[in-house]
Image (tube, rainbow, N blue to C red):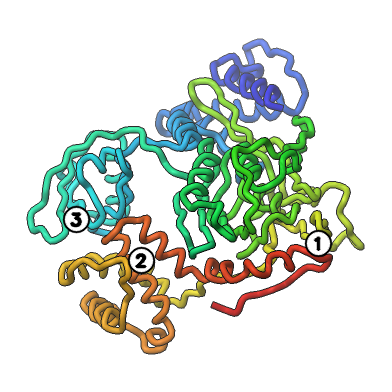
Amino acid sequence: MFVMNLKSASMIFIFLSGLALASPHPLVAQTAVPHDDVTQQSLKFARVYQALQQNYMGPIDPDKLILEGAVRGMLSSLDPFSSFFDRDQFKMLQEETRGEALGFGSILYVQPGKVMVIQTQEGSPSWRSGLGPGDQIVAVNGVRLDRLGFRELIQVLQQARSHPVHLSVLRPGKSAAQDIYMRPEQVKLPTVDISFPYSADIGYIHIASFESKTPQEVIEALKRLHYGSLKGLILDLRNNPGGLLDSAIEVCSLFLKPDQVVLTVRGRAVPEKTYRTVQAPLQIHLPLIVLVNGNTASAAEVMTAALQDHDRALIVGEPTFGKGVVETVMPLSEETGLALLTAEYFTPSGRSLQKPLAGTALQNPIRGIASASLDSPSQTARFRTDNGRPVLADGGITPDVQVPTWKLDPWLTFLNQTGMFASFASEYFTYHSKIDKNFEPTAETLEEFRNFLAGQRIRTPKEYWAKDQEYLKDQLKIALFNLAFGLDYGNEATTRSDPQVKKAATLFPEISRLLQGRRQHSLRASRM
């Protein structure tokens, strides 16, 4: 299939170089043209391009027109996943695969007119320059940030990532800014971004994506948690978009037995292949709960489905995204590349995870390999786990225990979107001494927040204030911890206040019962 595409592309470029097979001039000899579909459609494209080249009001850029327009348009007509990468995008993709990026190693909180540091990575340029939580960047290369709109601010910060910069930084409690000069470097980006002991005997690990280094990062996190003394592990795959399939298989191998099926791949130009667990440096036998949501996708769904089909983990949260296709990245000339869908994958029980996408090549995905049991074509395909539990193949993964996340009212949504919690935290330390790690917001803290909002001319609706107290306290604590102790402590505070994590932690005594039997359990948590 790829060879055919290259031939088609070559034909188009021959046309555009002036060697068109059909000339518009009647006195020029005509060359016989093959009548296959590819040639005929290429001729149409060549005629359109020639008309643009001769008649458009200004000069046109062939690279931009063909690569940005024709190639991207051709791929987007197939499905939402296939794409073309230009030189810069392909380089960025390669960096992400390696788990690194050019930058300074800072995590910033950004709102219109204000940029604050909430964490710096050890050993990075930011760390060596002394930047830390609570520092405010007031200027970049002489450009005052408080005078920029949000889009302009983001643009300035993005442009600064790959070049040496002069920063003006205002330290907490200081009135004069300090000048800092930094050069960007390749900075390692962790994929296991949160891990901590949730309780004395339950560990928590969040995997943000699957890259080549992810299995080792999971092993290191397990060792930090002293996994041998734990009685349970929460593995959080929420908001994990996937990544490298081999990496997901290696992580699966830490929790499944050797040589167990993880997935089977099938495609028109791809021989059918079954992937199994590999020999792992650790074998983890802890009771396991996997958290998922609507942004859990691709390789993260592969791992979740394998653990569910083998009854190795209880799946908790919300239905996953539903991406059950394999993207293959194909390098092209001049450091560009294509990402194409080349196959579908199927879970150990034989089901497909691909949800139907109307108007694309995926509008009628295969529901699964022959083991499905259907009483009528309109029914959802059902498959069985190793213990005989029924699981669905209707797009994505349906959790064994469905638990909703926070349901935010319009006022809370507004406060989050405008960054009011972080802004309050920044002002809080102007009038208060540092907080300790046992800090909990009180009624007085809430009253200070309400007065702060009033100073920002933001009304506090009576119908929301009373019922939103718990959420407000959680968000204030998170924002204060981010600035006082760094993002790691803020992330831990965020996780501990999360209703899905709280519910998951209570389910460990139920795991054995829920993973046995032949009926589908439908526990549902009370509305949060």
Residue 76 in view of the camera:
no
Query: Which of the two residues, 229 or 286, is positioned nearer the viewer here?
Result: 229
User: Residue 339: horizontal and vertical position, in percent?
Assistant: 59, 35
User: Mark 2–mark 3 contact, CB under 8 Å?
Assistant: no
Tag 2: amino acid: Ile
Provide the residue designation for mark 3: 147
Q: Callout 1: helix, strand or loop?
A: strand
Label annotation for residue 390: 1
Q: Is residue 178 above or below residue 394?
A: above
* Label of residue 478 in the image: 2
Q: Tell me the CA gap for discs 1 and 3.
A: 58 Å
Say which amino acid is labelled 1.
Answer: Pro
Which residue is more in the foreground, 481 or 372? 481
Precedes in sequence: disc 1 or disc 3:
3
Helix, strand, or loop for circle 2?
A: helix
Quarter of the picture containing the N terminus is top right
**Residue at image coords 19%, 56%:** 146
Circle 1/circle 3 CB separation < 8 Å: no
Determine crowd level at label 3: few under 14, some 14-19, many 20+ residues with C-alpha closer than 10 A: some
Distance, label 2 to label 3, CA atoms, is: 28 Å
174 on left or right of 342: left
**In the depicted structure, whether residue 392 falls above or below residue 272:** below
Residue at the image position 67 percent from the left and 57 percent from the top: 313
Mark 1, other Cα within 10 Å: few <14 / some 14–19 / many ≥20: some
Q: Nearer the viewer, residue 337 or 528?
A: 528
Q: Amino acid at mark 3?
A: Arg
Q: Nearer the viewer, residue 57 or 3?
A: 3
Indicate the position of residue 186 as horizontal and vertical percent values.
Answer: 36, 33
Instruction: Give the quarter of the image for residue 525.
Output: bottom right
Can you tell which quarter of the image residue 88 is in? top left
Mark 3, secondary structure of its residue: helix
